[in-house]
Amino acid sequence: MGLAQYADNGVFAPRRIAETLRTTSEEIARTAGLGRDAIQRKDRIQSDKTQRRLREMVEIINKVEPRFGSALMAYAWYRSEPLAGFSGQTAMRLVRDGRADDVLDYIDAVDAGVHG
């Protein structure tokens, strides 16, 4: 799915992400490593940190969605599947730790047949 479905006026919107993934804005904040305040106050939603974390999460889910057939299944993978080579950490844990680039590199490596 396109990134635009997750945004309002060019800004990633926790509410839109939550609607697409059939969960709550609070859950989106938690899985992106953000506090509740970050998704409730307009100035915080638009902050660089909040937007970066939401973008990273959406990029990862979008990247693996074709593999799983739906955004919901991709979100489940993001939250619960341990990644090989990361000591059992999930994509969610790595994003929360500021390591989204590592997750994207891992996905590229799997797609290239390096990891399985």
Image (cartoon, helix red, strand yellow):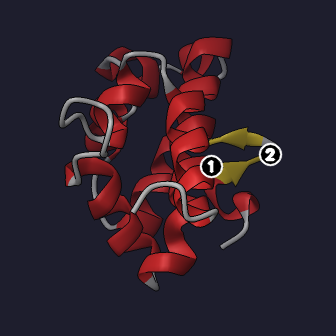
Residue 60, compared with residue 51, is above or below; it is: below
- Give the residue number, with chain letter if any, for mark 2: 9
**Residue 7, x across and y down, in percent:** 68, 50
Determine whether the residue tagged by mark 2 lies in a helix, strand or loop: loop
State left or right for residue 39 relative to residue 16.
left
- Disc 1 residue crowd, few under 14, some 14–19, many 20+, Cα 10 Å: some
Disc 1 from disc 2: Cα separation? 18 Å
Residue 65, compared with residue 32, is above or below; it is: below
Task: Using the image, tell me which numbered label, if any, was put on residue 29.
Answer: none
Q: Amino acid at mark 2?
A: Asn
Determine whether the residue tagged by mark 1 lies in a helix, strand or loop: helix
State left or right for residue 12 relative to residue 60.
right
Q: Quadrant of the C terminus?
A: bottom left
Q: Quadrant of the N terminus?
A: bottom right
Residue 38, compared with residue 65, is above or below; it is: above
Q: Residue at x 28, y 58 (%)?
A: 23
**Residue 88, x across and y down, in percent:** 18, 37
- Disc 2 residue crowd, few under 14, some 14–19, many 20+, Cα 10 Å: few
Task: Tell me the mark number nearer the camera, choosing from 1 and 2.
Answer: 1
Q: Residue at x 21, y 29 (%)?
A: 87
Front residue of 116 and 50 = 116
- Give the residue number, with chain letter if any, for mark 1: 59
Q: Amino acid at mark 1?
A: Glu
Residue at the far bottom in the pictured view: 69
Which callout, 1 or 2, points at the residue further toward the start of the chain? 2
**Residue 40, x across and y down, in percent:** 42, 26
Front residue of 38 and 94 = 94
Residue 7, compared with residue 40, is above or below; it is: below
Residue 13 visible in the displayed image: no
Front residue of 46 and 21 = 21
Residue 43 visible in the displayed image: yes
Looking at the rendered structure, the number of numbered marks drawn on it comes to 2
